[in-house]
Image: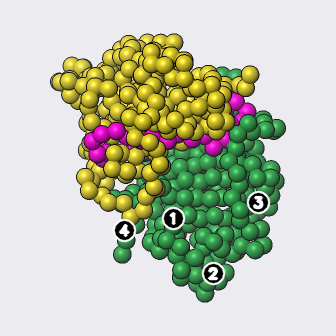
Chain colours: A green, B yellow
Amino acid sequence: MPPTGSASSDFDAATAVTRTEGGGLLAELDPGWDVGGGILNGGYLLAVAARAAVLDGPHPHPVALSASYLRATAPGPATLTVVPGPAGRTLAHSTVALVTDAGPTLQVQATTATLGADDAPEWSSPVPDVPAPDECLNAAPGASLGGHPVPAIGLRHRVETRMDPATAGWALGRPSGEPVMRAWVRLADGREPDPFALVLFADVLPPTIWGMGLFGWAPTVQLQVLVRALPAPGWCLLESRASEVAGGWIDEDYRIWDSTGRLVAQSRQLARAPKPR
Amino acid sequence: MPPTGSASSDFDAATAVTRTEGGGLLAELDPGWDVGGGILNGGYLLAVAARAAVLDGPHPHPVALSASYLRATAPGPATLTVVPGPAGRTLAHSTVALVTDAGPTLQVQATTATLGADDAPEWSSPVPDVPAPDECLNAAPGASLGGHPVPAIGLRHRVETRMDPATAGWALGRPSGEPVMRAWVRLADGREPDPFALVLFADVLPPTIWGMGLFGWAPTVQLQVLVRALPAPGWCLLESRASEVAGGWIDEDYRIWDSTGRLVAQSRQLARAPKPR
């Protein structure tokens, strides 16, 4: 059986889920989507789980995914197990487990549905005022951001990231003091956004605590992503924001708008916070 | 084995989880915590699941719970199944399933930890400006709110609810047009708040779309609750807010502050939205 997605897109190839002759589901977790230290990005892993959730389900789109990150996940082969739950005309529930050589690494509650192409919102959040992508800071690996080279983690090669200068003071040695980030993003392979790309984008920015000058890794504990609409082609605008940093814990909220200014996804995660130095 | 919690609290008794001689976990879902139509409140059910998650785990507090609501849940006996995941000094993961006569109704990703009593926040969200509880509208069952009696659903008997007049225009026949609600709440049994009560509170207000004049039931599809700190005694202040209403879907975000103004919990849910009339 051919893998899901299009072979011409790096993202589709890296998130493909295939069925074995024995009926199991396999993915080959791609080392190119790391966040440093050989650890894969949480949004990338959740997109792989989302592909598994829709593979045999009645609906094509992930609309709600809640994942526990059981341990850091390294590249390599992974098996996926989908346990279907109640399914109907409006939505379907399932549970997805991702298991690597190291054991189970991701456990996901998945809800899928069929998003409409023209569901105009009755209420929506306004898009923040951010300079156009060309006027933002290009966080390409190796590029100089305020005199500091952007780390060459795989994720920044795969997702073009243009940071809003107003929330990128940390890159210039002048952290704003606020745990907020805004950026335009798009897939570097030229593929237009869809619900699976939105799942990836929902955990793609640097940790918001960098805005407070606290540099370090903030490993995700639980992440919930809601996909609210089919995104229009073009750049997506992301805003991530922490509400509280305390006791070694941080939350991060993402909102994602498409190129037309429509709110198309939201996420919230609980993560461990690096300690102040 | 005695049930968890204190027998002198209605909330503790109604959320108690007991172990049978055979080793299984049982709860008796209490008809007093309904939201109408013999359907139990989602926060109440999640609090029961949270009790199961901590029962044999190494940590006493639920810090992240993500639940899929598979079907509406009626009162009566329920069994709970806890599958432990990785556990360490900082946190422990597990999966909790709640099953009634109607089949599985709730599937939960649970993360537990040990919250500190004095983890002062390094960053936090300011508490909104709301009149004191005595100056808010008492949404007690049978009370008159703008000439309309408050429906006698069980939940409003169990949780004292004082609505901020600024977001209660819908009760007076003048919906604000904004899907926002604010209220002070506390358990009617006099028990002080703790992480389990915060889980209940995270889904305790009327649907935010009532603020838009769209009256109807908004059944929860997925709900994530984060408990950020041990709450101080007294009233908790809740603010719920929808970011988008579209295509028959609505999100609801809760923030919960304790009586000292500390942000102690957050939640987000995806729900089905009643259609405009």
Q: Looking at the image, is mark 1 or mark 4 nearer the viewer?
A: 1
Q: Which residue is mark 2?
A: A145
- C-alpha separation, residue under disc 1 versus residue under disc 4: 14 Å
Q: Quadrant of residue B65?
A: top left
* Residue at 33% in and 36% down: B196
Amino acid type of the residue that numbered disc 4 sits on in the rendered structure = Lys
Give the residue at mark 1.
Answer: A179
Q: Residue at x 53, y 73 (%)?
A: A176
SS at badge 3? loop
Please determine whether, in this image, residue A253 is positioned above or below residue A175: above
Name the residue type under label 1: Pro
Q: Chain of mark 3?
A: A
- Residue placed under numbered mark 4 in the picture: A275
Q: Which residue is mark 3?
A: A235
Q: Classify mark 4: residues with Cα within 10 Å, few (<14), some (14-19) or many (20+).
A: some
Amino acid type at circle 2 is Leu
The spot of residue A126 in percent (x, y) is 70, 51
Q: Earlier in the sequence, mark 4 or mark 3?
A: 3
| SS label for mark 1 | loop
Of the numbered discs 1 and 2, the one sitting upstream in the chain is: 2
Q: Nearer the viewer, residue A148 or A183?
A: A183
In terms of secondary structure, where does tag 2 sit?
Answer: strand
The quadrant the C terminus of chain A occupies is bottom left
Q: Is residue B189 visible?
A: yes
